[in-house]
Amino acid sequence: MVRTTADISNKTGGTKFLNLLMLFTTAAWGPRVVFVSIYFSKSCGISLEQIGVLIAVPIIISIFAGTAWGSFSDVTGRKKPFLIQSAFIMALSTFAITLVSSFELLLLIGLFAAFLAPHAEGLMVASVFGFSSSQTRGTAYSRFVIWGSVGWIAATVIGGFVSSVFGVKAALYLASLLFFIAMIVSFKVPEPRTGAITTPRRNYFAPTTELLKKKEITIFLLILFPLFVATNMGIFLPVYMDFLGASFALISIASTIPAILEIPFYLYLGKVSDRIGKRKPLLIFSAFTSSLRFLLFALTSNPYLIFSINSIVALTWPPLDVASSAFISDVLPSEKWVTGQTLYRIMLWGIAGTIGPFVGGLISGAWGLPVMFVFASALAAVSGIFSRRITER
């Protein structure tokens, strides 16, 4: 007997394994993101300029490769095979990093992962929305994403502990193990019936091109892009705190506390978004609170005050994340959800993730980090001002 999506969701808890997958996937990214640069520098002797290349080049490649994989998922109407593939490639590539130390080989591993790893988050979010209605997407997403927050907090803390005891390479072993567990969980993830594009396509970038021709999506991405760039300029906060004399413990806690505080905000804001039936108010709120956060960074040189100010992230990131993800699925048919979610994340973490650190580095190098934060504040404010022009259904 063929079960419907509702049967899967209501009788067997369709999102149960998606929640576990989000937990382990985000947990794996925690120690990988936090400690991979330290590994490159301390264990491999890679220069800061080369570290920038090792991080930026794969991101650029993944913009195109991730788009193709997302489009391919929509064309086939399948998500599970790509989730399995993504977790496997990331487990393999993260472990491979620990086996080499030359810049050339590390870059080759990065390119391997960028080409072959689909964007797991977009696939998971599309699956979550496949088990929810248009009236409950914000709530469903917020309940789903807090599993990622829990995973990030736990794995980052554990990664810090094992690194201090066994060396920084141990954090990468941990990340690889967590990606492998995520791959195992992926086999149990149910496949929501969100449809497929029945007409065969040879060009898997075509669905993305079609989305960019959609007025609501184009306006949404263009207006929020300055905020995306500002968000990625926030990677300089640890550098700024270190410059001001903060201890490594304080810097570490500064990236952990906001993740803890954002959990209740995720739960609350998802319900608020569904209750009012609009995503725009949360986007405007996120942009202006982000602007305030960066401006306050520029106005203080006390690392303890900066630590406190950074807690505002709990008010800036959840509303942007919840409202943006729900908005994408509100304006697109279900057979284009993976492409839409992937495109949004490519703009946020791919294109803006390349431009933000690059521009931030230029500005801070020429005029200092406080000026860079003022610039980031202005970018976020621009998105807040023009967010009123976002078209909702």
Image (cartoon, rainbow, N blue to C red):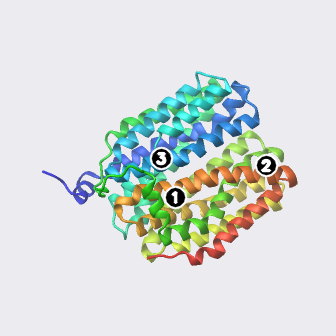
So how many labels did they put on this image? 3
User: Crowdedness of circle 1 by 10 Å Cα count: few (<14), some, many (20+)?
Assistant: many
Above/below status of 321 relative to 245: below
At mark 1, the secondary structure is helix
Q: Amino acid at mark 3?
A: His
Mark with earlier residue (3, 1): 3
The residue at the point 77 percent across, 49 percent down is 361
Q: CA distance from mark 1 to mark 2?
A: 29 Å
User: Crowdedness of circle 3 by 10 Å Cα count: few (<14), some, many (20+)?
Assistant: many
The residue at the point 35 percent across, 41 percent down is 81
Mark with earlier residue (1, 2): 2
Instruction: Give the number of the disc on residue 344.
Output: 1
- Quarter of the C terminus within the rendering: bottom left
**Which numbered mark, 2 or 3, is in the foreground of this view?**
3
Along the line of sight, the residue nearer the viewer: 363 or 260: 363
Q: Which residue is mark 3?
A: 119
Q: In the drawing, does residue 343 fall left or right of residue 355?
A: left
Q: Tell me whether the residue at label 1 lies in contact with that at label 2, contact meaning CB atoms closer than 8 angstroms.
A: no
| Residue 234 in sight | no
Along the line of sight, the residue nearer the viewer: 329 or 281: 329
Q: Which residue is mark 2?
A: 240
